[in-house]
Amino acid sequence: MDNIEKYPELLPVFQDLQRFIKPAEYELWIRPLDFVYENNILTIVVPAQTWQDTISKRYEGILHDLFLQRLGNTVTIQYKIQPQEEHKPILTDKDVISATQNTDFAVERAPVTETTPSNLFISRLNASFTFENFIESPSNRFARQSAEAVVHQLGRPENNPLVIFSSPGLGKTHLLHAIGNQIMKENAGAKVLYMSGEEFVNDYIESLTTQSAENFRRKCRNVDCFLMDDIQFVSGKEGCTLEFFNTFNTLYSSGKQIVLSSDRSPQQLGWDERLSSRLLAGLTTEIKRPNLETRIAILRYKRDLNHFNISDDVLSFIAEGVQTNVRELQGCLFRLVHYCNVWNVTPTIPVAKEILSDMLENNSNPNVNINTIKKVVGKYYSVHMEDFNSKRKIQAIAWPRQIAMYLGTELTNLSLMELGREFNRDHSTVVHARDLVKEKVTTDPFFASQITQIIEDIKDVEKK
Ligand code: ADP
Ligand code: MG
């Protein structure tokens, strides 16, 4: 991990990993590694096969989750085995095997108290979530402005607590971190603590079993601003809800700022009267779903930030297909770019459609007339209308026919059987044609752009 400084954006990921696994595990398996991170590909340099096997079995899942949560990226993990003499001499395979045999390495969270020296305050903030990189829109404007107001009016009763709620993936976590980061920027030495509801529950339970409840309390209560994400996790666990209530009261009565997020409104949390009325005493704001312009703006921002080579029309296509969740919106962009990089394909709309089919909302087909498809494809490839239904098998006719069948599956609501009938064939021929053309769309950028053009032409003819 000596080269982690080269990739500051990865720090939050590895800091989290360190908290999720036992210290001994981290020291043994993770710390000795070097890695390279480029284009969302994490190449882990391992000294021996044992490392690769272990890391891929135990930590790949967590790493994937953390990349997605912390950086909003899907990551591809690959390995490079570097012989021991080139690498820093660490432990040999034999050491590792004997260590593994003697230790229970089940992945569980490391007790925070063990890894945190008492004089060190860890805010748990993710520096990559800021106000600057949060796109403002009508759907989040009030939440964002309230969040910014809090930074400059810490502890004011009218903003305390600030509660931000929304359905998943709309920027709550981002705003909480942005508040924390901005406070730290403007007030050197401020104590800001970010904690998710899940962490609160886990840490609290752990503090009971390790008899460090006092430490836990001190950690949560001795702060200037307490940011707690996803407070719905505390619901239904009596001891935790009570602990949260007490934490809340201690902070509130000493004028400390509290910012909370939830996936539902305070009223819907189902908490007892006293607690919900406390939550509602400050400022409550909802982030709504972003409109189309905002979704496009977010995609353009991420594209420019990452220097992705992808056109506005493809971004608009993605924005139309993902309407309810910014995390998934970004996920689509990253998946498409990653796929196109790996296969050296230009990201076009047909490619996006194929690669993201499971993530895009099923906008019903435009239900184009099959004869329009035949007409436009026929014109494009100089094929007579009647040849689409004929038995002629020469490539100059068979290929455009297959393209027309593929477009039939994409642009009409006809079943495969019905489509087969339209071409005087059975449904299996349509399936074969569809798969063949689909394959070419995703592997041949030139062809993909031809298909985009044909689709545009078909839509134009239909409009007339
Ligand atoms: P939530 O906590 O509401 O589930 P997150 O804060 O984790 O959502 O947001 C999901 C992803 O979307 C994050 O990567 C975040 O940076 C991004 N995101 C959400 N809203 C915006 C926005 N308005 N501008 C820029 N990025 C955003
Ligand atoms: Mg969140």
Image (cartoon, rainbow, N blue to C red):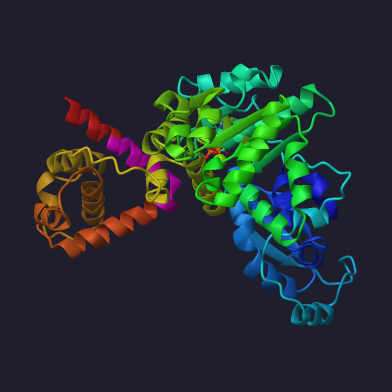
- Quarter holding the N terminus is bottom right
The magenta segment: 442-455
The answer to whether 192 is drawn above or below residue 345 in the figure is: above
| Image-quadrant location for residue 227 | top right
Q: Residue at x 37, y 45 (%)?
A: 353
Residue nearest the observer in this picture, 13 or 51: 13
Q: In terms of secondary structure, what is the magenta stretch mainly?
A: helix
Residue 439 lies, in percent from the top left, at 37, 56
Residue 291 lies, in percent from the top left, at 41, 26
The answer to whether 203 is drawn above or below residue 72 in the figure is: below
Examine the rendering and report whether any part of residue 351 can be seen: yes
Residue nearest the observer in this picture, 193 or 320: 193
Residue nearest the observer in this picture, 461 or 84: 84
Q: Is residue 269 left or right of residue 240?
A: left
Residue 321 lies, in percent from the top left, at 37, 38
Q: Residue at x 26, y 58 (%)?
A: 433
Residue 233 lies, in percent from the top left, at 54, 47
Q: Is residue 308 left or right of residue 15?
A: left
Does the magenta-highlighted stretch encompass residue 361?
Answer: no
- Quarter holding the C terminus is top left
* The residue positioned farthest toward the front in the image shown: 274
| Image-quadrant location for residue 45 | bottom right
Residue nearest the observer in this picture, 374 or 219: 219
Q: Is residue 401 left or right of residue 339?
A: left
Q: Residue at x 82, y 82 (%)?
A: 94
